[in-house]
Image (cartoon, rainbow, N blue to C red):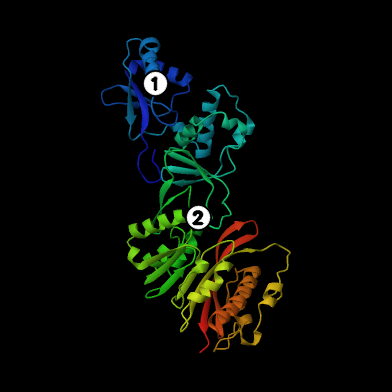
Amino acid sequence: MEREDGTSVAVVAVVTERRFAQRYREFLEKQKLLDRRHRVEKMPDGTVALPVLGETLPAQLLQELRTRVAPGSTCVLTQLLDPLPSKKAQGCSPAQRLCLEVRRWVEGRGVAWSAELEADLPRSWQRHGNLLLLNEDCFQNKQWKNLGPELWETVALAFGVQRLAKRGRVFPDGTRTPAVTLLHGDHGWVEHVDNGIRYKFDVTQCMFSFGNITEKLRVASLPCAGQVLVDLYAGIGYFTLPFLVHAGAAFVHACEWNPHAVVALRNNLEINGVADRCQIHFGDNRKLKLSNIADRVNLGLIPSSEEGWPIACQVLRRDTGGILHVHQNVESFPGKNPQPPGSSKMEKEHWPYPQKIITNEWENGTTRDFRRKLLSQATKLEWQRWAESAETRIAILLQQVHGKPWKTQILHIQPVKSYAPHVDHIVLDLECRPVL
């Protein structure tokens, strides 16, 4: 068996003479100690190794094997560094194997197995090397609490990992700290590689979304050579690193207020060889002192990055402007008619100089209705409506921040992932230029 990082998982085995192997097997099976996931192996000296569960066996049990189960036999422990999966294990899915192992372990402790316990086993998980991260909707039955930490060791063994953690809901503390509990193992640090970029982080302290890979790949392909970027919600470097490593950005100002994420970000910049092209700004980005510096601004916060819009406008270059990448979760309920832009109370209250807000026409006469036709046919109407509303409001902010009109243009609307039923995570690419 191999872990996801390609290294072998060592398995403990009992070694004895071939003529005693069947007696050993029957005894270990009866004691719920035989590891059914791996094959019994013949050793070079003719002895037989029987894989067992756990990291060791007590000396008293080994003595019982030698004297009572098979008198006259020799009995030693060894580690199989490259164990072969059993035929039964090869035919089982990970979920089936987990159910088999946990049920055997539970029943071995005198607890009756039930449909309720089986339904409470995990059906999905994330794997980070030798750490498995379970979802919050499993092992919730009260019976699990009475089984002690050995339960988590059994689950880890069933998956062939060394560490086990369980996620909860993300704390609404502004830093999006994950409520993750380490169940088995001594630390939560893991490494994940996306598109050749190494991300190291502590899963108990920092978020990592596999669903953002399409946006990280897109960011990596943007023409950023020679440009200065501001990443307002840098985290562990989800987008900061693709901008630097693949998109060729000259420099990135990375803003982050989660201290655990900052530790990971600093480390990730170093291990990817781009630390000299990035400055970390630790703290609340709404108090950021930067201005008139950015060719691009990334606003990678969901469900909304709206609180960062004013500072994004502030950091754009006054002479040439730049591009904003604005993340948002947008609802799209069937049968619900979205409001047209400008109809909400908030938008009406923030429309002080409508005659000076230039959002619908550029020098070539391209109108908003025409640009809407240019957007992908796959773009939902709700996405377009939100993008046009955001464009209008950001144009107002730009005028308020810089004291003169700016022109804006929707370049692209990029779907990232489905966040929940009828809720889509999208990114608006908005070009913003001062009117000269």
Report crowding for label 1: few under 14, some 14 to 19, many 20 or more residues within 10 A (C-alpha): few
Compared across the picture, whether 386 is left or right of 239 comes to right
Q: Earlier in the sequence, mark 1 or mark 2?
A: 1
Q: Is residue 331 above or below residue 360?
A: above
Q: Quadrant of residue 236?
A: bottom left
Measured as percent of width and height from the top left, residue 251 is found at 38, 70
Q: In the rendered image, which residue does mark 1 sit on? A: 58
- Picture disc at residue 209: 2
Which quadrant: the N terminus?
A: top left
Task: Determine the CA span between mark 1 and mark 2.
Answer: 42 Å
Report crowding for label 2: few under 14, some 14 to 19, many 20 or more residues within 10 A (C-alpha): few
Judging depth in this view, the residue of 151 and 284 nearest the camera is 284
The residue type indicated by label 2 comes to Ser
Q: Secondary structure at mark 2?
A: loop
Measured as percent of width and height from the top left, residue 174 is found at 55, 58
Judging depth in this view, the residue of 21 and 114 nearest the camera is 114
Measured as percent of width and height from the top left, residue 387 is found at 60, 72
Res. 341 in view: no
Res. 432 in view: yes
The residue type indicated by label 1 comes to Pro
Judging depth in this view, the residue of 165 and 275 nearest the camera is 275
